[in-house]
Amino acid sequence: MAASASSSSSSTSVVPKHMDTLKDLTREKFLDIMQSVEPAEGHEKWKVLLVDDETTTILGSGCGMFNLIEAGVSLCEPIKNRREPLPSMEAIYLLSPTEESVQHLINDYDLKYDPKRNIYQYAAAHLFFTSRLPAPLFQRLTEAGARKMIKSLKEINLRYWVYESQVFHLQMPDVFQKLYGPDQSRRNTVYRNIAQRLATVCCTFGQQPFIRYDAASPHAKGVANMLQKTVADVQSLASDAGDQRPLFLIVDRSLDAVSPLLHEVTYQAMAMDLLKVDHKTTDQFQYEYTDNSGDVSTRTAILLEDDVLWNDLRHMHVFEAIKKVVAMFNAFVKENRKAGNLATGRVKSLKEMGEALRAQPQYQDMLSKYSLHVNMTDACTNEFKKRQLQLVGQLEQVLVHGTGGKKLLNELRTLLMGEVRDGDKRRLVQLTALCGLMKEAISLNDADIKAGDLEQIVESMGTRASPATEPSPSSSSKSKKKSKKVETPDSFTPRLKHLLEDLLGNHLSTDEFPFTNDVVPKDLSNFQPVPATEEFSKKKKTASRSLKSGAQLSQPTWASKRASQGKSKGKLEALDKPNVSGRRIVVFVVGGTSYAEVRSVYELTRDHRRQITLGSTEIMWPDLYSERLSQLAS
């Protein structure tokens, strides 16, 4: 039984920025680095920033060029590129501790020195490495000619990528194969690598975390114990912050192996699944744009939270998102009388809205924000119909709820023999196997998946209960009465959300989800959860509905109500941050997380007013997860 430690009076004091999101804290960390460099007298006050491939993406995920300019950085360049000498400017090197990056740094001063004018590439060098610099590389620096130009060297402990304000990943796509594939001989090394990167998140919070893990998962246990050892050696982390120390909950993908395969009907999840989004560095979407003169061009949009409209729509049912885009556009037209004859009329569909957008060239900058989401929502619904996902989604739900019987098998076989995309067929067969219907999955061989591959998938991912059949993994929840009613498709809830609800409600078993050490503060051993909002309480009483039988993508019954709530005006204003309190919670999924789980974290933050952050080794859309499963047998 874990011992309880009393909190000192100082532990309850409020720390500034305690409830800032990870994205906010990461941005401030970057800006502190830039502002800490003060050029010497006689040098230009502006600084140049050099980055490598890894730090380019890390920096881009948490900080924009405008923020850098505010911190005195006038130029940001890749270190591997050929660059013009700027001998009067001091340089900040934000680098990963790799041989390639260190060699580029050395070359800047050893190979680019001009002896005739006695000038170097830059006036001085300030080095910031994202993690510990290996001794051999440090030795190489001390022996290089660049050493006399180095004015400072620090390790900043930042090896994670901020995806959204409450979501981060470690950019470790090889973890899935290494932990779930046939060869797991190096899994301890994988645990150590994950823990070292995850510890840098703790460094950004500035506090020693309390760590809990899923005892049924050897991967979660391995990472949790390694993380505990790693952060214990970091002296800069506060261990006396009491209720301000974050709580890390570590699970792995086998906790819920089925939900990442399901087709979603919320906007962001649908877009990442159905549209051709480029995920290489940032989520980029290309679409055809028709201007007011009728000319067609291809535009590229980056899907970031800076787009307030995307921020507002991304977790809505796609029907609700369409309705809100149209409503906001009509409000915009109403508020701008100079918009011509549209000022007295209203558009009723995406088609009418597109025509209206092209008819108002004087508002193109503003209206292009609407145009992007007109294109994306329209593309989502078109793909949904084209790929017969109405029927596919219904069969997926019957599978995960275990209510199909022989009729289900016949419907599956009929569907797979039809014109269904190969990737959707593969996902259905894999889902069938993971839902415990191995014989049925093998018989559905139209997807050309070998029986041995399916057996390997189930063996690797386990046969743990799906969220539908087991509302919560905690012992207290297992005693709850199970509803015999099969939920509608969009009400399917990832198991991770049930798990977090148990944690927030203080129902999470310490036997099944123990702490990594025996000292647990009182507020974690017997704390009172923040009351849910009135909106959440009402939602718990009313089952939502969406994909009704029929050929159309149907509106959920709650769509009309929620569409009328909040901001309905045409102005694109930044959304207020949720008013949160209590201990920060970080849930980390070893092996990859899904967009349904991303949405769940935001919903729980809103409904329970708690700061919840989701992290993982990578973020997977359904086809990528399906490919990962297929590769397990190789």
Image (cartoon, rainbow, N blue to C red):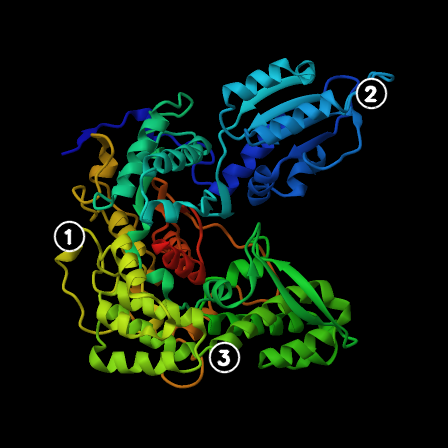
Task: Tell which of 356 and 345 is nearer to you.
Answer: 356
Give the vertical position of 604 relative to 85 (above or below): below
> Residue 386's mark?
3
Question: Quarter of the image holding residue 257?
Answer: bottom left
The residue positioned 37% from the left and 76% from the top of the image is 392
Question: Where is residue 125 drawn, in percent x and y?
Answer: 68, 22
Q: Secondary structure at mark 1?
A: helix
Q: Callout 1: 10 Å neighbours few (<14), some, many (20+)?
A: few
- Label 2 amino acid? Asp
The picture places residue 438, in percent across and down from the top left corner, at 23, 67
Q: Earlier in the sequence, mark 3 or mark 1?
A: 3
Which amino acid does the dot numbered 1 rest on? Answer: Ser
What residue lies at 67% left-to-right and 70% top-to-bottom? 288
Write down the residue under mark 1.
476
Calculate the distance from the C-alpha at mark 3 to the C-alpha at mark 1: 44 Å
Is residue 447 shown left or right of residue 377? left
The quadrant of the rendering that contains the N terminus is: top left
Mark 3 or 2: the one toward you: 2
C-alpha span from label 3 to label 2: 63 Å
